[in-house]
Amino acid sequence: METTLILNANIVNEGKVFQGDVFLKGSRIEAVGKDLASRKADRVIDADGLYLLPGVIDDQVHFREPGLTHKGNIYSEARAAVAGGVTSYMEMPNTNPPTFTQELLEEKYSIAARTSLANYSFFMGAANDNLEEVMKTDITRVCGLKIFMGSSTGNLLVDDPHTLENFFSRFPSLIAAHCEDEATIRRNTEAFREKYGEDVPIESHALIRSHDACLISSSFAVDLAKKHGTRFHVLHISTAAETKLFDNSIPLEKKKITAEACVHHLWFNDSYYKELGTLIKWNPAIKTANDQKQILEAVLDDRIDVIATDHAPHTLEEKKNKYFKAPSGGPLIQHSLVAMLEFYHQKKIKLETVVQKMSHNPAIAFQIAERGFIREGYFADLVLVDLDQPWSVSKDNILAHCGWSPFQGVTFKSKVISTFVSGHLTYDKGQFDESVKGQRLLFSRN
């Protein structure tokens, strides 16, 4: 087995920052200490001045394969992920066809086994008519069940109350949900269409997909989870009011209801619509500066447990349509870690907290086996970062298949230098070694 010795790194792990060495053997971390320099290794990396973090685990991405590969695919988006320090991801079921059967779910795992440079898991998708198929899911090998409890297309919207009761009462593991109230959104859409016709200004997006739409749906879902004792994870919180739904009085390991914030809701607010337009059209919508501020506060005080991306690429041609025709979503996974490190430079968040929310907590919340920490015996999913190597996002260095980013033109102070995926040096100083693919995530669940 190949061995790697990382020396003199500033290790950020489990609430501490300390200088030390890490010895990798095969896919695992064999030793963490301060006196490992005498060990012989196939590869020695002097990480003096660099910071060694556990690899980021992104619990919400849309990689578009199968069926929507003109926007992105598992290979291209996982490649962008590892370049950004993301070593594991959990991908959503709104592909074409949607992931509503065990057969379709396993087809995605097969594609990832052949092509994904990062570790991977895929959500089973809920529909109004596939409960029995969902109940066949192996919860030790699948991250969870995704329910779209808000506007979507086709059969992806689950709005039947009896069906929702069955999912929340019967599914034996984690349910993750997109929460926006469909009736509220439809009423708001009709009102704005009546006022503007087809020329609704993008600034109206946060008023159509409103605060009320989010809070009504999230509150309903949280109440449903409490009623049935469901392990429930609310995705992409976008309003200040929703943050009050969540508890910080108990440790994450004991929480039944958890929440996620996304990078775009932390970075942008509705003042950015004027400059970026539909490029920052997401569902749920980017809202006010006060929402942005209070979401970060909820991250810091542990009401919100996880930071993710909701990476959802579309082509630039698709995004540059008028309001109703421009799809929601955008590419973020290559820049999520450096964006959060920018908040560290701005003294808004500690390094230890970035690691907690992007690496430790996803592993805890989803019960991922032996990942998310720099621990002896754990898989060596690691990222080396230079906190003082500024670089600017440009079309030439964007790796997402769609070829654009809402961060284009932004200069970040920090840069990802190297990324190890299950012990393999997959990305190093701009170069990829694609000879070894990522692994399927496993889950420590009964």
Image (cartoon, rainbow, N blue to C red):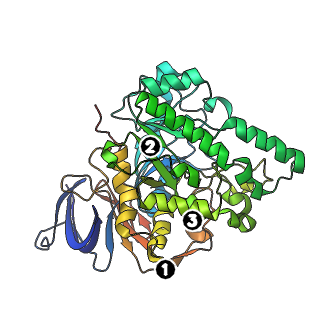
Of residue 136 and residue 226, the one placed in the foreground of this image is 226
Q: Are marks 2 and 1 in contact (CB under 8 Å)?
A: no
Disc number for residue 112: 2
Label 1 sits on residue: 390
Circle 1: is it few (<14), some (14-19), or many (20+) Cα within 10 Å? few
In the depicted structure, whether residue 6 falls above or below residue 258 = below
Q: Quadrant of the N terminus?
A: bottom left
Of mark 1 and mark 3, the one earlier in the sequence is: 3
Q: For the residues carrying marks 1 and 3, which lies nearer the camera in this image?
A: 3
Disc number for residue 59: none
Residue 141: percent from left, percent from top: 35, 35
Label 3 sits on residue: 267
Q: In the drawing, does residue 263 fall left or right of residue 389?
A: right
Q: In the drawing, does residue 294 fall left or right of residue 418?
A: right
Q: How many marks?
A: 3
Residue type beneath disc 2: Ala
Residue 243: percent from left, percent from top: 51, 51
Q: CA distance from mark 1 to mark 3?
A: 18 Å
Q: Quadrant of the C terminus?
A: top left
Q: Quadrant of residue 120?
A: top left
Specify whether residue 254 is in view. Answer: yes
Residue 252: percent from left, percent from top: 34, 48
Q: Disc 2 on helix, strand or loop?
A: helix
Q: Disc 3 on helix, strand or loop?
A: helix
Q: Which residue sits at x=56%, y=20%?
A: 162
Specify whether residue 106 is in view. Answer: no
Q: For the residues carrying marks 3 and 2, which lies nearer the camera in this image?
A: 3
Q: Which residue sits at x=43%, y=28%?
A: 228
